[in-house]
Amino acid sequence: MNLLIRTLIVSICILFYVSYLHAQTNYYTTTKTFNESGYTYQCDIASYNLVILYNKSNSSTAKVDEVRT
């Protein structure tokens, strides 16, 4: 009985955690610029729902199309 109750509690906690993770996916739906603590951050959204977050004033940030070795 004790194992059954513990398993049930853990299962319910996992379900709540999974629903919390699912809710996190909608924070960045469009490209945005953030000004926080003296820094400017750019959030770009790619067509396949990839979020790219970077410091806009960082001059060493560059987009690389292809890297050959």
Image (cartoon, rainbow, N blue to C red):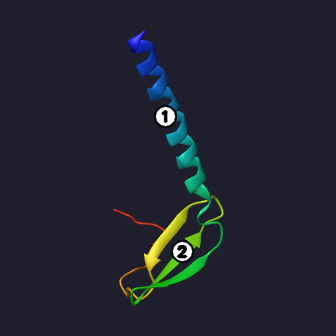
Whole-Å distance between the Cαs marked 2 and 1? 30 Å
Q: Amino acid at mark 2?
A: Cys
Q: Is residue 64 left or right of residue 69?
A: right
Q: Mark 2 vs mark 1: which is more N-terminal?
A: 1
| Foreground residue among 21 and 44 | 21
| Residue ID for mark 2 | 43
Q: Residue at x 39, y 86 (%)?
A: 37
| Badge nearest the viewer, 2 or 1 | 1
Q: Amino acid at mark 1?
A: Ile
Which residue is tagged 1? 14
Q: Secondary structure at mark 1?
A: helix
Q: Nearer the viewer, residue 41 or 8?
A: 8
Q: Establish if 15 lies above or below 56.
A: above
Q: Which residue is at 63% across, 58% downward?
A: 48
Judge whether 47 appears above or below 16 on screen: below
Q: Is residue 56 above or below residue 20?
A: below
Rendered location of residue 32, percent (x, y): 59, 78
- Is 22 or 50 nearer to us in this picture? 22
Quarter of the C terminus within the rendering: bottom left
Q: Measuring 55% from the left and 82% from the top, which residue is drawn there?
A: 33
Please state if 22 lies on the left or on the right of 57 as rendered: right
